[in-house]
Amino acid sequence: MLIDSFNRTIDYIRVSVTSRCNFRCLYCMPNTPFEWIPHENVMRYEEMFEFLKLAIDEGVKKIRITGGEPLVRKDLDKFVKMLHDYKPELDLALTTNGYYLKKYAKKLKDAGLKRVNISIDSLKSEVAEKIAQRDCLNNVLEGIDEAIKVGFQVKLNTVVMKGINDNEILDLLEFAKNKNVIIRFIEFMENERAYPGIKRVDSKEVLEKIKTKFSFKELPKKNEASKNFMLEDGNIFGIIEPHNEEFCKSCNRIRLTAEGYLIPCLFFTESYNIKEAIRNGDIKKAAEILKDVVKNKPEKNDWQEEKISDRAFWETGG
Ligand code: SAM
Ligand code: SF4
């Protein structure tokens, strides 16, 4: 069992399988990084699997595959299958921008993936293109439909930005309701890589906006990043508010990057590399590093406008 110094049980790992992406979202990767990670520095799926087996044996129950854009890495379904075959009851999830989902959804479902979170920031083609810096909306919409069709549990993620897509909160909520899926509105997390003009919309404002049209009640907090609310018709939506003091109390996750860095908290720069230990077949060392990461997980993040994180979301997987 992995328990940190603040008595939080760590049973969730987010794995970024690539830092590359086919989008250039304003809040994440507005410019192409100067240099991508050289191929030999990227952990092979087999290497990630060796480490993840260790974590699963230590009590990790949920693995979310993310990126960059995870669907730009080849053979993702094979990686999913390795994990699923090792422990079929593992909660295996994916976060994707949806662009290639129509093509891969069925393969991933057959491999054992259970849940998919899809990022959608606008229902207007030109706004979606402005945010992702790529004409993308049709593909994303087709990806959402395919994911629902093949039977995934689907959630949608929207980063709300002042003056860009904050006038679409109600439309996006209606869209999710009509598809019978949960949408979560995420507060923009300030970071050095984001486009400098981006301003966050506090979740309070999001809730105020939703109140102008719908009645809802807050649901008891579960062990997840979002606070969830139920609308009168039974549909659920969520908010993710990393700027809220309470946010970190129930944090149960650590992150693994494509280069093998284990990251205890998204905000801080601390990281520990497990790649060499795994490449040398030194599982004992990898297990020690895992324990250190958990032990050194900070109590709280520090997302504020004045204190901008230098973490790159495309490396850590969000
Ligand atoms: N490419 C995939 C996608 O966009 O869903 C997966 C990786 S992305 C880094 C994971 C999540 O992080 C996405 O939901 C994205 O919206 C969110 N994200 C990225 N940068 C963010 C930021 N600065 N603030 C809040 N959320 C962010
Ligand atoms: Fe790519 Fe996801 Fe970052 Fe957008 S948020 S640039 S889709 S990694």
Image (tube, helix red, strand yellow):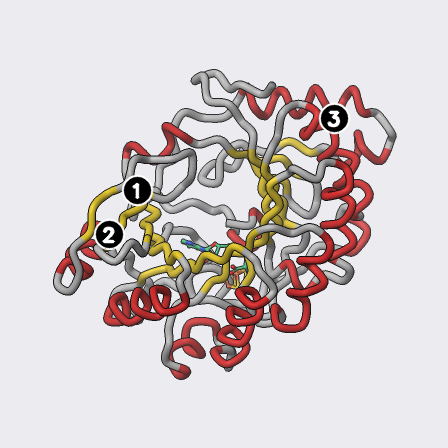
Q: CA distance from mark 3 to mark 2?
A: 39 Å
Residue under label 3 = 286
The x and y percentages for residue 276 are 79, 34
- The kind of secondary structure element at disc 1 is loop
| Residue type highlighted by circle 2 | Asp
* Residue found at x 87% / y 31%: 280
Residue 292, picture quadrant = top right
Distance between the Cα atoms at labels 2 and 1? Answer: 8 Å
Q: Residue at x 63, y 20 (%)?
A: 291
In the image, what residue occupies the spot 24% across and 52% down?
202
Up-down relation of residue 189 to residue 25 (above or below)? above
Residue 85 point in image, percent of width and height: 77, 42
For marks 2 and 1 on the same chain, the one whose residue lies earlier in the sequence = 2
Q: Position of residue 49 (x, y in %)?
A: 76, 40
Q: Is residue 125 left or right of residue 46?
A: left
Q: Amino acid at mark 1?
A: His
In this image, 38 relative to 302: left or right? right
Residue annotated with mark 1: 243
Name the residue that disc number 2 marks.
202
The residue that appears at 63% across and 40% down in the rendered structure is 256
Q: Are marks 2 and 1 in contact (CB under 8 Å)?
A: yes
Q: Position of residue 122 (x, y in %)?
A: 37, 72
Pointer 3 with pointer 2, Cβ within 8 A: no
Q: On the rendered image, what quadrant is the N terminus found in?
A: top right
Q: Quadrant of residue 149?
A: bottom right
Circle 2: element type = loop
Give, as a three-letter code, the residue at label 3: Ala
- Give the class, few, some or many, for how many residues have Cα within 10 Å of label 1's Cα (few <14, many ≥20): some
Kind of element beneath mark 3: helix
